[in-house]
Image (tube, helix red, strand yellow):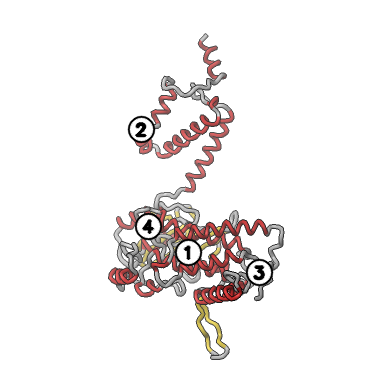
Amino acid sequence: MCKILRRRDVKEPIATPRSPRTPRLSKCSSYQSKSQSQALDSRTPSMSSSTSSAQHYISGSRSNNSSAIYTTGSINRGSFGASISSKTSLSSIRESLPDNPNIYDYSEICAATNNFLAKRYFSSSAAWRCSLHDKDAIVFQRRLRRSIEASRLRERLSLICRSHHASLIKLLGASISGNHVYLVYEYVNGVSLADCLRNPKNPNFTVLSNWMSRMQVAIDIAKGLDYIHNSFELNQNFVHNHIKSTSVIVTDQPSIHARFCHFGTAELCGEIPEYTEMPKSSSSFLSRLKRAGSQSMRFEGTRGYMSPEFRATGIGTQKSDVFAFGVVLLELLSGEEPLRYRLDGEKKDYRRVSLIETAREAMEEEEGKGEEEGEGGGRGSGWLRTWVDRRLKDSFPVEVVENMTRVALDCVDVDPERRPSMRDVGGKISKLYLKSERWSKSMGGLPTDITVSLAPR
């Protein structure tokens, strides 16, 4: 008689809410208590994530199908399939989470790079692609700007390695030897944004040949920098300090996206002072940076990306990051270098041309022409179209390009107080990205390899 009742209990589920009388349910509810879950986490870390996901799955099944709740804790076939997919998603999430930071021994770095005799990954910097702890990685050699203790290095390294954002390349660990620090980043298969925009072997070709690909790069790097400034460790004021087109890696798997490298370099190399908050006045801001700076902390930045206060003090801040981001945005729009030299036919000499200056001139001409013609912005005069990268073949939404140029010029304002925060910049670019998507869908029936504008060149 008892056996028959058991079988009926298994086959016929009871659609009633859970009762504390059932041993298994009381056991599950005990897992939800805070003290026992903490003890469970300390003994078996992987089990805690499985338990929380199981609770989430049970609560979801309760709202979707109350008959799936069994007093004996058994699960039907549909729920079993869902639990398998839940485990699969859990394993993929666990693999994507950052590992513990590694403090590599200097001998490991030497062995991986063949005593630094291996071919350099970037011709312009000390970087080597190698394998460390069975992971494909890139080792960057940087000079220490000030000494750092091993405990302090471990603390900063563990903090930076906790960063997890789709637009950031992960820092795996570091090693120190003498006056140099060796930063180990994960290897990402891609090409720098500078090489995508300016291919010396084929200047007329670029993989970013359509407008949406460039907007995707813009929104990726904007979100990544916003995460560094505002979302990562809210009680910290992190600075990237190495923003340039060569620090942005463009990948095409499965689609075109952009990721920042070198995050954490400024912190671990001692390039950033202990505080980076922004005072209310620009004069006090510059004087404070000058007091904080010293010859040992100052370093040379990359030409074309340095803000005026950075050139005066040599110390990077979040506002100087915004300035460098604005320059990269202008590169995306025009395809040109931040600084270049052109031959002046009249003077028979080379003249330095600034990308910021040419962008301002194009916007002034565009707005001035628009006021004369009464078109409110000059969307037909062609001045801005002449400045935008010709390889886009005039196939872009003109209004969005104008607004993107204004955002970039706001970022490169001479006064750091007048520059927007990356949170504001990211919000504006997100709205312009949505407008670009609507434009792209409306142009879906037209070929992308011809011009769709009748404006003069």
Q: Amino acid at mark 3?
A: Lys
> N-terminal of the two: label 1 or label 3?
1
Residue 15 lies, in percent from the top left, at 53, 22
The residue at 60%/54% (across/down) is 254
Q: Give the number of the disc on residue 128.
A: 1
> N-terminal of the two: label 4 or label 2?
2
> Marks 1 and 2: in contact by CB < 8 Å?
no
The residue at 58%/30% (across/down) is 78
Q: Amino acid at mark 4?
A: Asp
Q: Residues within 10 Å of mark 1 (few under 14, many from 20)?
A: many
Residue to which mark 4 is pinned: 105
Residue 17 lies, in percent from the top left, at 48, 24
> N-terminal of the two: label 3 or label 2?
2
Q: Give the number of the disc on residue 36.
A: 2
> Marks 3 and 1: in contact by CB < 8 Å?
no
Q: Quadrant of residue 256?
A: bottom right
Residue reaching furthest to the front: 374
> N-terminal of the two: label 3 or label 4?
4
Q: Amino acid at mark 2?
A: Gln
Question: Comparing marks 1 and 4, which lies closer to the viewer?
Answer: 1
Q: Amino acid at mark 1?
A: Trp
3D distance between C-alphas at marks 1 and 4: 16 Å
Residue 148, placed above or below residue 158: below
> N-terminal of the two: label 2 or label 1?
2
The residue at 54%/26% (across/down) is 68
Question: Comparing marks 2 and 1, which lies closer to the viewer?
Answer: 2
Q: Quadrant of residue 38?
A: top left
Q: Is residue 385 visible?
A: yes
> Marks 2 and 3: in contact by CB < 8 Å?
no
> Marks 2 and 4: in contact by CB < 8 Å?
no
> N-terminal of the two: label 1 or label 4?
4
Question: Comparing marks 1 and 3, which lies closer to the viewer?
Answer: 3
